């Protein structure tokens, strides 16, 4: 049985979620052709520390950076590098904070300049699949209801769901129970209880679902080298409707960002 969070804990998780949401928007402002992923990481780390928080990914099991920056066929856990983003790329930005003893964790996939129609469709469908999953994150449901919602939506476009990684509970630890798979069957999995705080984070591939671990032991890449998208939000399980703690509104209200 997963212990729900108290309302006091939820407020601390909300503070983290807002900071992560604003950090993603700061990063989104500078995503453009010609920018390196190292520069995106620098902007995020500075913003997080300026707000009195710590980038929780840095040093996590040896991860070397504040952000996971995953370009094109990298699904998740890419390292920042001197790779120069180019028109038509996509870059998934996953951000974590540690503040007042609690964690924040959210992700957004940004197009770099103009992307082709197929890529736009992948981004839109992945983000929409996240919201479908969140709709199912209500008390009385089970994690399989979330997974089923994500999977059935994403697959209706001919895309595939990465199985190797999943969403999770969030609290004092970055990864808590329950696991929240992005595939599954209704009525299966962990029971969702009011006050549970979870991250829903579909990783959706344009081509096959299979992935492999790159030689650096971190980056997860698509086996067919087609693109993959990743969006993540933190929500509180409530009765009737989940409460979103993190948000993409800071990203999407900014007209300078071509989301
Ligand atoms: Mg994340
Ligand atoms: Mg996560």
Image (cartoon, rainbow, N blue to C red):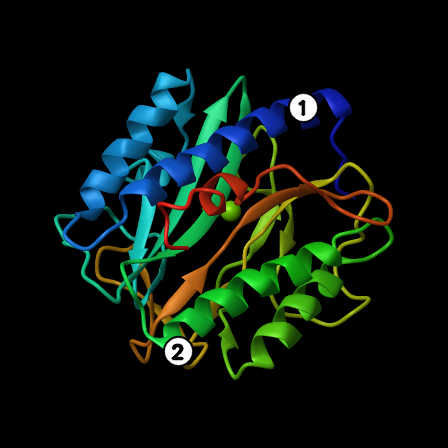
Compared across the picture, whether 209 is left or right of 88 comes to: right
**Secondary structure type for disc 2:** helix
Tell me whether the residue at label 2 lies in contact with that at label 1, contact meaning CB atoms closer than 8 angstroms. no
Residue drawn at 54 percent across, 31 percent down: 18
Identify which residue, 185 or 20, lies in the foreground: 20
User: What is the x, y in percent for residue 214?
Assistant: 26, 63
Residue 87, percent across and down? 21, 63
For marks 2 and 1, give the one nearer the viewer. Answer: 2
Residue at numbered disc 1: 11
Classify 156 as above or below 197: below
Instruction: For marks 2 and 1, give the CA distance.
Output: 39 Å
- Judging depth in this view, the residue of 224 and 118 nearest the camera is 118
User: Residue pushed farthest front?
Assistant: 255
**Which residue is painted at 28% across and 48% down in the image?**
31
Q: Quadrant of residue 176?
A: top right
Q: Quadrant of the N terminus?
A: top right
The residue wearing badge 2 is 118
Mark 2 Cα-neighbour bin, 10 Å: few <14, some 14–19, many ≥20: few
202 shown above or below 1: below
Q: Position of residue 54 (x, y in %)?
A: 39, 23
């Amino acid at each position: 049985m997963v212990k729900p969070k108290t309302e006091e804990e939820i407020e601390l998780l909300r503070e983290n979620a807002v900071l992560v949401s604003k950090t993603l928007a700061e990063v989104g402002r500078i995503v453009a052709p010609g920018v390196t992923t190292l520069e995106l990481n620098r902007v995020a780390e500075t913003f997080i520390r300026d707000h009195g928080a710590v980038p929780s990914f840095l040093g996590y099991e040896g991860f070397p950076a504040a952000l996971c920056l995953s370009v094109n066929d990298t699904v998740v856990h890419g390292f920042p590098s001197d790779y120069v983003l180019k028109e038509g790329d996509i870059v998934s930005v996953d951000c974590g904070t540690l503040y007042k003893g609690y964690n924040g964790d959210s992700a957004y996939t940004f197009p770099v300049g103009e992307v082709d129609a197929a890529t736009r469709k992948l981004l839109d469908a992945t983000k929409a699949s996240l919201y479908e999953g969140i709709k199912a994150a209500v008390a009385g449901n089970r994690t399989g209801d979330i997974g089923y919602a994500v999977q059935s939506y994403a697959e209706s476009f001919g895309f595939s769901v990465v199985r190797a990684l999943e969403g999770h509970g969030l609290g004092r630890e970055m990864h808590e129970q329950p696991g929240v798979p992005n595939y599954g069957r209704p009525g299966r999995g962990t029971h969702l209880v009011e006050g549970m705080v979870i991250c829903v984070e579909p990783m959706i591939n344009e081509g096959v679902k299979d992935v492999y671990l790159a030689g650096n032991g971190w980056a997860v890449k698509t086996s067919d080298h087609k693109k993959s998208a990743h969006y993540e939000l933190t929500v509180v399980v409530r009765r009737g409707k989940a409460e979103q703690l993190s948000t993409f509104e800071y990203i999407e209200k900014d007209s300078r960002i071509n989301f």
